[in-house]
Image (tube, rainbow, N blue to C red):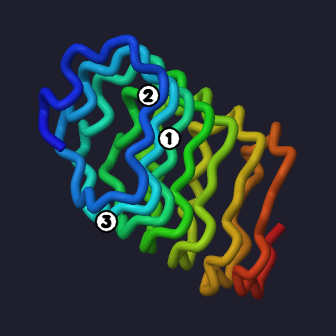
């Protein structure tokens, strides 16, 4: 994908580009999709996502990046997605999730799936900018070992920690 691919499609509401061979997302590649509410990019070969790939998507509510090859997310990757409520990053190669990918703008996020990755631990500050999170899936991250600190998730209604290998639960 390159800058300009979606020029003239400012009224598009849903974009499904699943099951392709997209390997990277450069800066501003979606900038003309100002009305887009749902972006589905599952089953691609995404390994690299630039820090400003999602700039220009002020209306985005749902983002599905599942079943790719993503092993890291840049800091503030979702900072421009101020209406995002659902983020699916399941079935990737993520090992570490840095708290900096979620910032004050992530305050609307209600559902986060990090299932079926390679996450072994989560930083204690991971959830500080996600006060409205209601659903969290960390299932099938086999080497997690330590129960994540979820004390800040006071609105959480659904939590999946199955098949994580948790051995220790701290108060």
Q: Secondary structure at mark 3?
A: loop
Tell me which corner region of the image, top left, top right, bottom left or bottom right, holds residue 124. Answer: bottom right
Tell me which corner region of the image, top left, top right, bottom left or bottom right, holds residue 147. Answer: bottom right
Q: Residue at x 36, y 69 (%)?
A: 69
Vertical order, 148 against 18 (above or below): below
The residue pinned by badge 1 equals: 63
Residue 135 in the image, given as x and y percentages of width and height: 75, 47
Residue 111 in view (yes/no):
yes
Callout 1 touching callout 2 (CB < 8 Å): yes
Between 135 and 148, which is closer to the camera in this rendering?
A: 135
Left or right, 24 with respect to 54, comes to: left
| Quadrant where the C terminus is found in the figure | bottom right
Tell me which corner region of the image, top left, top right, bottom left or bottom right, holds residue 57. Answer: top left
At label 3, counting other C-alpha atoms closer than 10 Å, the crowd grade (few under 14, some 14-19, many 20 or more) is: some
Between 107 and 44, which is closer to the camera in this rendering?
A: 44
The residue pinned by badge 2 equals: 81
What's the mark number on residue 45? 3
**Of callouts 3 and 2, the N-terminal one:** 3
| Quadrant where the N terminus is found in the figure | top left
How far apart in space, not on screen, are marks 3 and 2 (Cα)?
Answer: 23 Å
Residue 156 in the image, given as x and y percentages of width and height: 81, 44
Q: Secondary structure at mark 1?
A: strand
Callout 3 touching callout 1 (CB < 8 Å): no
Between 171 and 3, which is closer to the camera in this rendering?
A: 3
Q: Secondary structure at mark 2?
A: loop
Of badges 3 and 1, the one in the foreground is: 3
Callout 3 touching callout 2 (CB < 8 Å): no
């Amino acid at each position: 994908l390159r800058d300009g691919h979606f020029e003239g499609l400012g009224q598009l509401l849903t974009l499904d580009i699943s099951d392709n061979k997209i390997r990277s997302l450069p800066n501003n590649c979606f900038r003309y999709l100002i009305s887009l509410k749902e972006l589905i990019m599952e089953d691609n070969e995404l390994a690299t996502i630039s820090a400003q790939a999602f700039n220009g998507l002020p209306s985005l509510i749902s983002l599905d990046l599942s079943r790719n090859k993503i092993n890291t997310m840049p800091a503030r990757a979702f900072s421009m997605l101020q209406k995002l409520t659902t983020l699916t990053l399941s079935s990737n190669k993520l090992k570490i999730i840095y708290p900096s990918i979620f910032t004050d703008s992530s305050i609307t996020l209600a559902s986060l799936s990090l299932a079926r990755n390679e996450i072994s631990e989560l930083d204690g500050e991971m959830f500080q900018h996600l006060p409205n999170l209601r659903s969290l899936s960390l299932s099938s991250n086999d080497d997690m070992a330590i129960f994540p600190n979820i004390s800040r998730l006071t609105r959480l209604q659904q939590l999946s920690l199955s098949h994580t290998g948790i051995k220790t639960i701290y108060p």
